[in-house]
Image: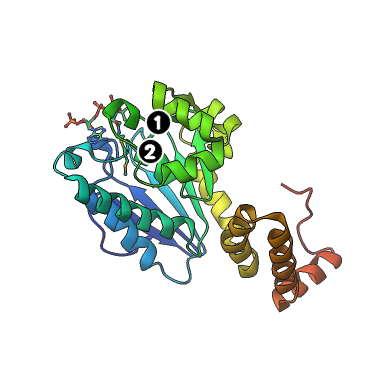
Amino acid sequence: MSNQLELPGTLRAEIAGPVAVLTLARPDKRNALSDETILGIEQFFRTLDPQVRAVVIDADGDHFCAGLDLAEMTEHDTLAGVAHSRMWHRVFDLIENGSVPVIAVLKGAVVGGGLELATSAHIRVAEESAFYALPEGQRGLFTGGGGSVRVPRLVGVAAMADMMLTGRRYDAAQGAAMGFSQYVVPAGAGRRKALELAERVAGNAPQTNFAVLQVLPRIARSNPAEGFMMEALMAAIAQGTDDAKFRMREFLAGRARKASDQ
Ligand code: 1HE
């Protein structure tokens, strides 16, 4: 893998063919997210090479991310707090609503803003050490990185309210059952699994990844009548592409993967 671009020392980017890996590289502070790191994440996604078709977010050390850098927060007044939260929204929106599928590798603490970052990704692979919590409740804070929007979508309002009010934490197996992660793998196996998934995602037709990232979330948030219509339009656009026609012919000729293959 080669280095992609200049980033703050708290981040590292590598690119290998169609897959890029962005690593949180501040393990001594449990990958706490400073302003510099958040802006570095923005720079990474804004300047992504168009050849990149999937991104893996990984982390150095035993913890994915301890959330907001609390050392920076104490200086903010109220209005600066709003601007700070809106900056996180802008950056995490770029991850969730960008054009490239993003896979996060979770381990150890996935807490506070770390959980907000993880929930901006499209696929989450958790190692067995992963645990989820929203310690904002214990610090006198509230989520500011989109957690109140994205966390309930995965696990429901009641589970999030409980996490914030009582400090409840969930382990990797519980997190998978609730919807925080789609995969649980043994310690140390997360990156390999995520890269394997990323290769597969990168091999999809562009219209499929576009539909899943841009259209599916809008359908899921719309009323059923509009949702069905959007689905019909997207289905017709996808099936009309030369790429889809080629892939269907390949299957019929016995040259494509079957749905029963792993
Ligand atoms: C930090 C941070 C941080 C660690 N900001 N410096 N997030 C939290 O409330 C979680 C706070 N962190 C923890 O609960 C624990 O650090 C962990 C469970 C993640 C890991 O525990 P451990 O025992 O492995 O590490 P540690 O000894 O607690 O921390 C190691 C160092 O990282 C230590 O610094 P050092 O200079 O004394 O070595 C810690 O101070 C530092 N550190 N976490 C700054 N978060 C957009 S709004 C989002 C709102 C939030 O995210 S609020 C939740 C914040």
Report the residue marked by disc 1.
108
Q: Circle 1: is it few (<14), some (14-19), or many (20+) Cα within 10 Å?
A: many
Quarter for ligand 1? Answer: top left
Q: Circle 2: is it few (<14), some (14-19), or many (20+) Cα within 10 Å?
A: many
- Work out whether mark 2 precedes mark 1 in sequence or the reverse, and give the earlier one: 2
| Whole-number angstrom distance, CA of label 2 to CA of label 1 | 6 Å
Name the kind of residue labelled 2 in the image.
Phe
Name the kind of residue labelled 1 in the image.
Gly
Q: Is residue 37 visible?
A: no
Quadrant of image for the N terminus: bottom left
Q: Would the CB of label 1 be found within 8 Å of ligand 1?
A: yes
Left/right placement of residue 231 relative to residue 248 reads: left
Image coordinates of residue 223 in percent, x first then y, are 67, 55
The quarter of the displayed image where residue 210 is located: bottom right
Label ID, residue 167: none
Left/right placement of residue 73 relative to residue 248 reads: left
Tell whether label 1 touches label 2 (CB within 8 Å). Answer: yes
